[in-house]
Amino acid sequence: MDTYIEGHFSGALAYRDLIKVLKWYVDRIIEAERQEHIQEVLKAQEYIFKYIVQSRKLFAFATGGQNEEEFRCSIQELLMSIRFFLSKESKGASALAQSQ
């Protein structure tokens, strides 16, 4: 997969949708009734981030670094969603541990 991402992947605009979709999933993790699909997305997040980075590199190369601020903001929003999810998870895990 790494070889494909680094050598053959050519989706210069893909990072935008990948960030939006990953953030959408992360924002819905806690309220989701069925966790299987979300867990699959989280297992694949390493490669999703690799696709995001490669796509952004391609876009920056093609445009001379346009939309850098937009990219930074969308990544920051994604990371804030992940941070929020992880804080909820750690609180839930500690509450569960205290009840046992």
Image: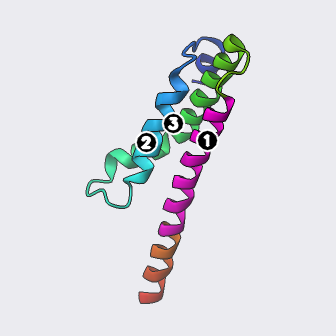
Of labels 1 and 3, earlier in sequence is 3
Tell me: residue 24, above or below residue 17: below
Apparent side of residue 31 relative to residue 89 in the rendered image (left or right): left
| x 60%, y 11%: residue | 8
Q: What stretch is highlighted in magenta?
A: 68-88
Of labels 3 and 2, earlier in sequence is 3
Name the residue nearer the viewer: 65 or 57. 65
Apparent side of residue 40 relative to residue 57 in the rendered image (left or right): left
Q: Are the residues tagged 2 and 1 within 8 Å (C-beta)?
A: no
| Cα gap from disc 3 to disc 2, whole angstroms | 12 Å
Q: In the rendering, at what x and y percent does residue 73 appear?
A: 61, 41
- The residue labelled by disc 3 is 19
| x 54%, y 67%: residue | 87
Residue 100 seen in render: no
Of labels 2 and 1, earlier in sequence is 2
Checking the image for residue 73, the label placed there is: 1
Q: In the rendering, at what x and y percent does residue 66 appear?
A: 68, 21
| Cα gap from disc 1 to disc 3, whole angstroms | 11 Å
Q: Which of marks 3 and 2 is in front?
A: 3
Name the residue nearer the viewer: 45 or 87. 87
The kind of secondary structure the magenta stretch mainly shows is: helix
Checking the image for residue 60, the label placed there is: none
Pointer 3 local density, CA inside 10 Å: few below 14, some 14–19, many at least 20: many
Magenta stretch containing residue 55, yes or no? no
- The residue labelled by disc 2 is 41
